Image (spheres, rainbow, N blue to C red):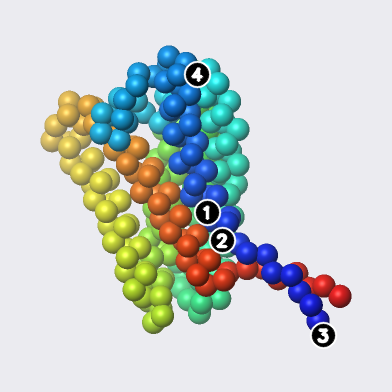
Amino acid sequence: MVKYHAFNLWWIALAAGLLPLVTIHTTFAVSVLQGFVEPCMPYWDSCTSISRTGRHGTSYFIFKGTMLPAAVLGIMLWWLSARWMRQLGIHTRGVACLPWLGLIACAALGAYTLALGHEGDGFNLIRRIGVVLYFSITYICELLVSAGLRSHPKWAPVGEKLMKLCLVTLGVGILSVVIEGAAPDLHDQIDDAIEWILAFLINLHALWIALLWRRSRFCVRFWAG
């Protein structure tokens, strides 16, 4: 009898969603303790940007040392998501695009992380482009996964729930744009809080994918003997 060892993959999605969240909250706490950021609740006080928590002191090294691996995990997340969906019988153009979109999004995250903490117009431009590409393309990846699952007879209910989460994320983004156009001063006051909320929602989607991989027993098998 041929034996094999199964290696569960759901922990990769778990790490991809959890590591960025743990990182930004850790760097925030360390920055507060070291006096670089005032104590506050960033999700509604809008007291500091995510970038600011990783610019100074010990947080500078924590942010770079964890967000770069997070970018690699993100690439793995979207590559494996495409394989997982094919195993479920979902063969759409969106699924085929997932690995490439994920690569672009996470490369942008890596560029943003490397540029963080350095002064100059070039670094500022890299940070702005990096964060916009990361958030927008990651959102597209999550939208493609949600839509693909919604088209599957067995996974349609959870796909619908994931799509609702995507709509909430989109709603927050649209609200930010509307406020920026209608009341720029107000937008400047709440912009940082919106960034924190979007980061939470995007990584929440990845954590949900991890639960689905565990539920479906998504794994890789190593044949032995």
Q: Is any part of residue 217 visible from this angle?
A: yes
Describe the element under mark 1 as helix, strand or loop: helix
Q: How many marks?
A: 4
Task: List the residue tagged with mark 3.
Answer: 1
Q: Amino acid at mark 3?
A: Met
Residue 66, position as x, y percentages in the image = 57, 36
Task: List the residue tagged with mark 1.
Answer: 14
Q: Nearer the viewer, mark 4 or mark 1?
A: 1
Describe the element under mark 3 as helix, strand or loop: loop
Describe the element under mark 2 as helix, strand or loop: helix
Q: Are marks 2 and 4 in contact (CB under 8 Å)?
A: no
Earlier residue among tags 4 and 1: 1
Q: Nearer the viewer, mark 2 or mark 4?
A: 2
Q: Are marks 3 and 2 in contact (CB under 8 Å)?
A: no
Q: CA distance from mark 1 to mark 3?
A: 34 Å
Q: Residue at x 41, y 71 (%)?
A: 148
Task: List the residue tagged with mark 4.
Answer: 56
Q: Are marks 1 and 2 in contact (CB under 8 Å)?
A: yes
Task: List the residue tagged with mark 2.
Answer: 10
Q: Residue at x 46, y 70 (%)?
A: 93
Earlier residue among tags 4 and 3: 3
Describe the element under mark 4 as helix, strand or loop: loop
Q: CA distance from mark 2 to mark 4?
A: 34 Å
Please identify the quarter of the rendering in which residue 151 is found. Answer: bottom left
Q: Residue at x 20, y 35 (%)?
A: 180
Earlier residue among tags 1 and 3: 3
